[in-house]
Image (cartoon, rainbow, N blue to C red):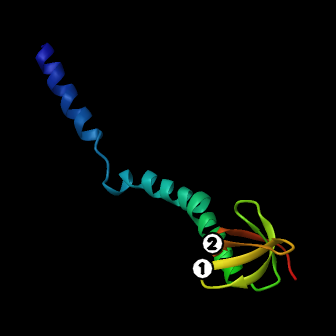
Amino acid sequence: MINLAYAMGGGGGAGGGQSGGFGAFIPLILMFAIFYFLLIRPQQKKAKQHRELLSALKKGDRVVSSGGLHGVITGMSDDIVTMEIAPKIRVKVSRASISGVASKG
């Protein structure tokens, strides 16, 4: 009698536990969408703004480097920016290390 109860209980539980294949992917799709809108998209937007800032640099702009140096751009090449941080004191920094423009002109 006990063997009959186990046999009847096992068949009904195993068949009801299976779900559709697409239903298992819904939480993964939702998780990816959340990560995209909270992490990936803002990061891409910030990187795009930084690229635009670097491409718009010109001589005479007051800039701040990522190391905290404030100065005026006196010369530029493709990858190197020459900044004057004090009268007659010039330093060369990587163009990618410019973090922002303090004020134009």
What residue do we see at 15% from left, 14% from top? 2
- Left or right, residue 53 beside residue 38: right
Mark 2–mark 1 CB contact (< 8 Å): yes
Q: Name the residue under label 1.
A: 79
Crowdedness near tag 2: few (<14), some (14–19) or many (≥20) residues, C-alpha within 10 Å = some
Q: In this rendering, is residue 98 above or below 11? A: below
- Which circle's residue, 2 or 1, is located before the other in the chain? 1
Q: Distance between the residues labelled 2 and 1?
A: 8 Å
Residue 33's disc number: none
Among the 4 quarters of the image, the one containing residue 47: bottom right
Q: Where is residue 76 in the image (x, y as percent from the top left)?
A: 69, 84
Q: Where is residue 1 in the image (x, y as percent from the top left)?
A: 12, 13
Q: What element carries label 2?
A: helix
* Residue projecting furthest to the front: 88
Residue 96's disc number: 2
- Left or right, residue 15 beside residue 38: left
Crowdedness near tag 1: few (<14), some (14–19) or many (≥20) residues, C-alpha within 10 Å = few
Give the residue type that dot 2 points to.
Ala
What residue do we see at 52% from left, 60% from top? 33
Q: Is mark 1 on a helix, strand or loop?
A: loop
Q: Where is residue 52 in the image (x, y as percent from the top left)?
A: 68, 80
29 or 82: nearer the viewer: 82
What residue do we see at 68% from left, 78% from top? 81
Give the residue type that dot 1 points to.
Asp
92 or 88: nearer the viewer: 88
Image quadrant occupied by the C terminus: bottom right
* Residue projecting furthest to the top: 1
Q: Where is residue 79 in the image (x, y as percent from the top left)?
A: 60, 79
Does residue 74 show up? yes
18 or 87: nearer the viewer: 87
Does residue 56 show up? no
- Left or right, residue 95 beside residue 3: right
